Image (spheres, grey):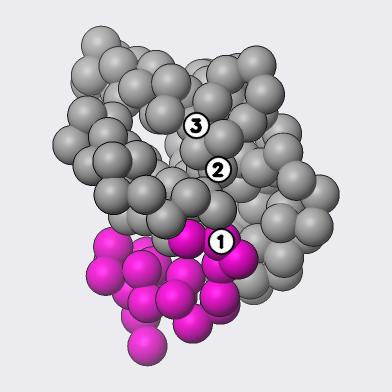
Amino acid sequence: MRALIVEDEFLSRKVLRSFLMTLFDVDIVVNGREAVEAFKLSHVENRPYELILMDIMMPEVDGIEALQKIRTLEEENNYTPKAKVIMTTALDDPQTVIKTFYDGGASAYLVKPVAKDKLYNELEKLGLLSK
């Protein structure tokens, strides 16, 4: 299985990679623009991402906009199954949660710093991890 980490902060990228590297083939990008490009490329290569961990607040293209673009590409190209997208953020703001879930189509939401056990619980709920 493949996972894409979308995170502009070096330490967060490193921690998330360490949590996922035994479970997934992990790629890393640093902003939403790169995430959309990596998502497109994964489908060109016929090796789509099952999981995307995406920070909300990033330069150039933020996580919410990138998620909307990815969901649009999935709809326009009939990609199935759709990628499971876990949004990560330092903001524990109910409006942000509502916007990413209901408007953006996020699969889950985690507040940073992301704890391994919380991440694994979400992966299990999404069917990407079996105990």
Q: Residue furthest right?
A: 10
Residue 125 is a magenta residue: yes
Residue tagged 3: 63
Q: Earlier in the sequence, mark 3 or mark 1?
A: 3
User: Disc 3, disc 2: CB below 8 Å?
Assistant: yes
User: Disc 2, disc 1: CB below 8 Å?
Assistant: yes
Residue tagged 2: 55
Residue tagged 1: 112
* Percent of width and height locating residue 91: 48, 50
Q: Is residue 87 above or below residue 118?
A: above
- Viewer can see residue 43: no
User: Disc 3, disc 1: CB below 8 Å?
Assistant: no
* Percent of width and height locating residue 76: 25, 11
Amino acid on which the number 3 mark rests in the picture: Gly
Q: Nearer the viewer, residue 130 or 69?
A: 69
Q: Magenta segment, which residues?
A: 111-131
Amino acid on which the number 2 mark rests in the picture: Asp
* Label 3: element kind: helix
Q: Taking 107 as reference, is 62 left or right?
A: right
Residue 130 is a magenta residue: yes
* Label 2: element kind: strand
Amino acid on which the number 1 mark rests in the picture: Lys
Query: Distance of mark 3 from mark 2, alpha carbons?
Result: 6 Å
Query: Distance of mark 2 from mark 1, alpha carbons?
Result: 9 Å
Q: Which image quarter: residue 92?
A: bottom left
Q: Taking 73 as reference, is 119 left or right?
A: right
Nearer to us: label 3 or label 1:
1
* Percent of width and height locating residue 4: 58, 44
